[in-house]
């Protein structure tokens, strides 16, 4: 264990970055592309597997990055009541704005770009919906927003860092079709700019959680 810890500490910043990004997003991006060709037969079980995988990766990289000297309290700060309210306002404003925008865009979008494989035909139970609405937002925003933007802005500037964050976010949501990718692009820009300017990640996590919870909620009724 000491040898492993020593090796982790010896990694270059570039090596650390690619280990985190590949481990956190290589499989989600691959699955997202494959889902366009081979829709899953049991989306509910698929979601449960994703939740477990994200929880394991969070624990593993919490340990990995703590050895590297990352201060997660400094990255995400401590949540406050104000963070929660800002997140709620974010989510409501975003969902309403995107709903109006997509209503106008949808008629002119080619049919093949509307493909989405997110129909949970077998239904979801409440524990799965709640777990997904907590674990997934923390996982995605901690890595794709907090980590990527903090890491890349140091050397390449905020524009490049936010752009890379948005690109990664869109890449693992292609299975949702153009509507999902468009929403992730807009949301990624808003979240990225907010985090870059304030350093507060919890409003983004709360907003993301709400935007996961309400769409998933309707699948508990099937």
Image (cartoon, rainbow, N blue to C red):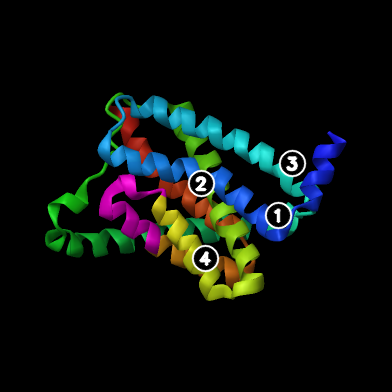
Estimate the x, y position of residue 157 in percent, counting from the top left.
59, 75
Q: Nearer the viewer, mark 4 or mark 2?
A: 2
Classify 2 as above or below 146: above
Q: Nearer the viewer, mark 1 or mark 4?
A: 4
Q: Secondary structure at mark 2?
A: helix
Query: Can you say which quadrant of the picture contains the C terminus?
Result: top left
| Image position of 139 (left or right of 214) | right
Q: Residues within 10 Å of mark 2 (few under 14, many from 20)?
A: some
Confirm or deny contact between disc 4 and disc 2 (CB under 8 A): no
Confirm or deny contact between disc 3 and disc 1 (CB under 8 A): no
Classify 207 as above or below 108: above
Q: Earlier in the sequence, mark 3 or mark 2?
A: 2
Q: Secondary structure at mark 4?
A: helix
Q: CA distance from mark 3 to mark 1?
A: 19 Å
Residue drawn at point x = 55 percent, y = 37 percent: 54
Question: Dot 1 corresponds to which residue?
Answer: 78
Q: Earlier in the sequence, mark 3 or mark 1?
A: 3
Question: Dot 3 corresponds to which residue?
Answer: 63
| Image position of 209 (left or right of 202) | left
Estimate the x, y position of residue 89 in percent, counting from the top left.
47, 60
Question: Dot 4 corresponds to which residue?
Answer: 192
Question: Dot 2 corresponds to which residue?
Answer: 25
Q: Earlier in the sequence, mark 4 or mark 3?
A: 3
Q: CA distance from mark 4 to mark 3?
A: 25 Å
Span of residues in magenta: 172-185
Q: Earlier in the sequence, mark 1 or mark 2?
A: 2
Estimate the x, y position of residue 75 in percent, counting from the top left.
69, 58
Q: Secondary structure at mark 3?
A: helix
Q: Secondary structure at mark 1?
A: loop
Q: CA distance from mark 1 to mark 2?
A: 25 Å
């Amino acid at each position: 264990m000491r040898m492993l810890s020593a090796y982790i500490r010896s990694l270059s910043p570039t090596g650390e970055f690619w280990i985190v990004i590949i481990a956190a997003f290589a499989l989600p991006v691959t699955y997202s592309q494959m889902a366009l060709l081979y829709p899953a037969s049991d989306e509910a079980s698929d979601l449960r597997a994703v939740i477990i995988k994200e929880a394991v990766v969070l624990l593993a990289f919490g340990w990995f990055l703590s050895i590297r000297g990352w201060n997660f309290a400094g990255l995400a700060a401590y949540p406050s009541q104000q963070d929660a309210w800002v997140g709620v306002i974010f989510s409501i404003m975003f969902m309403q704005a995107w709903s109006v925008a997509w209503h106008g865009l949808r008629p002119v979008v080619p049919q093949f770009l509307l493909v989405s494989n997110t129909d949970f035909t077998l239904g979801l139970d409440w524990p799965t919906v709640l777990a997904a609405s907590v674990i997934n937002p923390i996982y995605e925003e901690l890595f794709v927003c907090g980590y990527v933007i903090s890491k890349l802005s140091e050397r390449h500037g905020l524009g490049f860092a936010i752009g890379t964050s948005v690109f990664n976010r869109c890449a693992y949501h292609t299975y949702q079709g153009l509507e999902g990718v468009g929403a992730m692009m807009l949301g990624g820009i808003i979240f990225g700019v907010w985090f870059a300017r304030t350093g507060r990640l919890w409003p983004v996590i709360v907003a993301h959680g709400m935007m996961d919870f309400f769409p998933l909620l309707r699948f508990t009724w099937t």
